[in-house]
Image (cartoon, coloured by chain):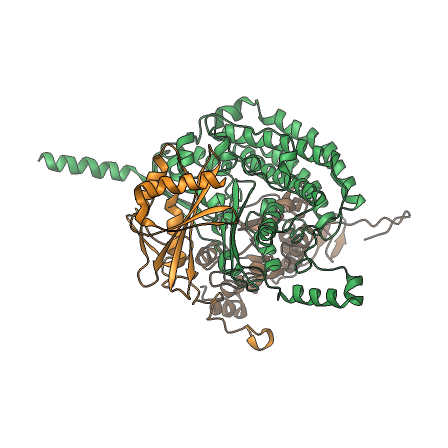
Amino acid sequence: MAEQTVTDQTSLEEKRYVTLNLGPTHPATHGIFQNVLKMDGEIIISSEPTIGYIHRAFEKLAERRPYNQITPITDRMNYCSAPINNIGWHMTVEKLLGVEIPKRVQYLRVIIMELARITDHLVCNAVIGVDTGALTGFVYLFQQRELVYEIYEEICGARLTTNVGRIGGFERDFSQKAWDKINKFLEEFPKVLKEFENLLNRNRIFMDRTIGAGGINAERALNYSFTGPNLRAAGVDYDVRVAKPYSSYEDFDFVIPVGTNGDVYDRFMVRQEEMWQSLSIIKQAIKNLPEGPYHAEVPEFYLPPKEEVYNNMEALIYHFKIVMGETDVPKGEVYHCVEGGNGELGFYLISDGGRTPFRLHFRRPCFIYYQAYPEIIKGSMLSDAILTMSSMNVIAGELDA
Amino acid sequence: MEVTEQERLVAILKERYDDQVEKVETIQEFLTLTLKKENIADIIQYLYHHPETKFQFLTTLFAVHYPDLNQIAIVYQLHNLVSNQRLRLKVYLPIENPTIKTITTVFAGANWMERETYDFFGVNFEGHPDLRRILNVEDMIIFPLRKEYPLEDQTREDKSDKMFGR
Amino acid sequence: METSTSNIKTYTMAEKPEGYEGAGFFATSLDKVVGLARKNSIWPLPFATSCCGIEFMATMGAHYDLARFGSERLSFSPRQADLLMVMGTIAKKMGPILRQVYEQMAEPRWVLSVGACASSGGIFDTYSVLQGIDRIIPVDVYVPGCPPRPEQIIDGVMKIQHLVETESLRRRDSAEYKAMLNKYGIE
């Protein structure tokens, strides 16, 4: 008799749990991934994520393409800040070849990468605002993204998937129009960012909604290999730009913002402060910009100017070999990482001397920290779970690759 | 990492696991150790807790297929955030039976990384809590990133290879 | 469309159809009125998967404003949507879900395929990407680009508007339409 009541009670408990399917298509355009939640009313008991709905086989695709054709693929990983991926890939190849990059190129690269970091954080913070109901911030910040798109168009011709630069530098120096647009951005953007801050930073409703939601402590975050703003919000000040400086980041004076709880409010504030730091880095780079060539001397990878191609035999041969993808690359194995919008974006390249990589592995920060999501939302309410997902800045292209 | 630091690290590892170390090399200033596969989980735990190494951050974990050697190499990259030292460990597995012990007991972040390696290469991680495909469709039978499998979908009938010589 | 003296073209979004006008009444054919009402109030379902989704967010923003065309209310539920905008790469794992969303939409429904990946697989000619969504659902308008500029997306929406305006009221019951749906295996 006693056994029967026990089983009755457990089956009663089982019936109390609701299975809710969140995704893969869900509103607010967060990306394509599915979470099957087991819920007790509004509280989440457990969740099971499923990803791979936009798996495009980048690593296999990279084994088929010559080195300069891989840049468009890297664009499409973290498409909110595509220049960082492109420049990171170019730096990996330059490390393999052992090429010395001129100072001017490094400073220009810093300017573009910091602009890209600003756009990435703009999307994330605007979407956090939207998920708490603040739709106005989204509209204002996306207007500023249009200004950055115009700068990209002046430099490389495309808005979103930029394919910026070449192995060795840039295809052309920044035109005067590009500088005008950058200066215009530097004048207008701080005012809009200040307005956005006034809307949300000390807003009672926003703070009540986000403080304490989706927190993770530093030890668990390190065990899950978190990097980027999510890790810095938990209290660990690891930033690849400071730990292993690349592209002259050691010349710049900037601060790494660090949070305490690792919750949604801390991540929001860390990203806000990083945007202000990026603005300061861009201003320093423009002030101290050295003169010099805008590309390194890498004739096997850098397309020669057209006048030389028509008149000079070597230039013609180089042009042919580069366009057809027949340049041979030295053998080697190299790992290079940059600070992407989400953390340490790493490229592990193994070359066996052929025209395409033997193996290219992308260390994608989104993929690695999203595994902690079920642990973070356990015991929280559904709306907090949605907010946590958007504050972690999960970008589907980087998640699945 | 300086040369003396590298030597110190290799010495610490060889103190306890001298027979497991097959090769020590520095590729592009990155210390790379090739190890045998038997005690890899213990070695990583040892490096995690040893007070002089403290490699408590797993940067990445992936596999490489070498068809000429008929081997699959698993590569672990560890990082000590405090002293800013990085280490790469490589383990070679035979292709007929690529099994290795899991390191999810040491690093929680290795969970999905090992699932991805299983999905792409078919490497069996013993002791993994939930080893199934993560990025590809569940009922796929091949391991696509191995070199013998093609990139494109072979069932397409509307592409003409005559013109584009694939 | 009339030109004023200072050579500025005025453009009206809702043009008066042909008909017979009198004091207090306006007579025209039913399908013209229905077409006019439908084309200026399309409720899209943004099925955004990847990079084209970010360009869609820019199109919905203040600069390019898709809401001018009547698409103010985005519907994320297929039951209440008219236009399925597929933006981004569709992998084979995602195919059945796209199909399920399409089947849940009520007639009349239109499909806009935005971007190279949705139209034909794009640059991803791999084992895991569906080479074009028209392998599983019927598509009305394709917008090429990688990603297409917001002006191109708006052009695609305007072409859908043209299709909506000129569609016959009996098309969805016709034998041709049913045969086309049968070809895709949709009841």
Figure label count: 0
* Residue A38 visible to the viewer: no
Chain B's colour is orange
Horizontally, residue A133 falls left or right of residue C13, namely left
Image coordinates for residue A1, horizontal then vertical, percent: 8, 35
Q: Nearer the viewer, residue B36 or A185?
A: B36
Q: Residue furthest bottom?
A: B162
Please report the residue visible at 42 percent of the width from the left and 66 percent of the height from the top.
Answer: B68
Q: Nearer the viewer, residue A258 or A170?
A: A170
Q: Residue furthest right?
A: C5
Horizontally, residue A236 falls left or right of residue B160, namely left
Image coordinates for residue C68, horizontal then vertical, percent: 68, 45
* Residue A246 visible to the viewer: yes
Horizontally, residue C52 falls left or right of residue A54, namely right
Image coordinates for residue B60, horizontal then vertical, percent: 44, 46
The picture quadrant where one finds residue A272 is top right
Please report the residue visible at 75 percent of the width from the left and 68 percent of the height from the top.
Answer: A313
Chain C's colour is brown
The picture quadrant where one finds residue C170 is bottom right
Please report the residue visible at 30 percent of the width from the left and 60 percent of the height from the top.
Answer: B97
Horizontally, residue C89 falls left or right of residue A14, namely right
Q: Is residue C174 above or below residue A373?
A: below
Image coordinates for residue A37, horizontal then vertical, percent: 37, 41
Chain coloured green in this rendering: A
Q: Nearer the viewer, residue A36 or A339?
A: A339
